[in-house]
Amino acid sequence: MPKGTQKEPWSVHLNPNGRIPVLVDRSGRAAEAAGFAGFQTAMILLHLELHY
Ligand SMILES: N[C@@H](CCC(=O)N[C@@H](CS)C(=O)NCC(=O)O)C(=O)O
């Protein structure tokens, strides 16, 4: 975080807020065929609860 990695384009692509945390789930458990990416702590916790 001190290096600003969360502001790099690849990271902002995953989370437009440019913050952490961000979750990428390529397990296939989520409905999205290509995988699931999401941000906001509450959303990540909900995703983990629903799929794991
Ligand atoms: N509402 C967001 C808050 C995310 C947040 O504030 N992340 C902080 C670290 S705890 C962060 O990325 N700070 C660095 C920055 O803003 O560049 C969530 O629930 O995930």
Image (cartoon, helix red, strand yellow):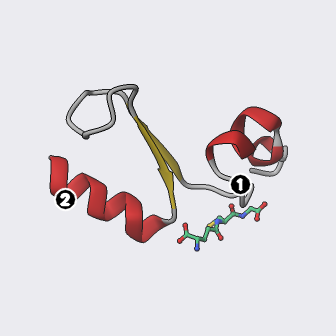
Q: In the image, is 51 to the left or to the right of 47?
A: left
In this rendering, is residue 43 above or below 36?
below
Image point 35% across, 27% down: which residue? 26
The residue where tag 1 is placed is: 16
Image point 78% across, 41% down: which residue? 5
CA neighbours of label 1 inside 10 A, class few (<14), some (14 to 19), many (20+):
few
Name the spot of residue 20 as percent of width and height, x first: 62, 55
Point out which mark residue 42 bears: none
Q: In the image, is 38 to the left or to the right of 5?
A: left
Give how far apart the Cα atoms at labels 1 and 2 are: 24 Å
Quadrant of ligand 1: it is bottom right
User: Residue 34's image quarter?
Assistant: top left
- For label 1, being within 8 Å of ligand 1 is answered no
Name the spot of residue 7 as percent of width and height, x first: 81, 47
Image point 70% across, 40% down: which residue? 13
Image point 82% across, 39% down: which residue? 8
For marks 1 and 2, give the one nearer the viewer.
1
* Amino acid type for the residue under numbered disc 1: Pro
Q: Secondary structure at mark 2?
A: helix
| Residue at far bottom of view | 42
Point out which mark residue 49 bears: 2
Name the spot of residue 31 as percent of width and height, x first: 25, 39
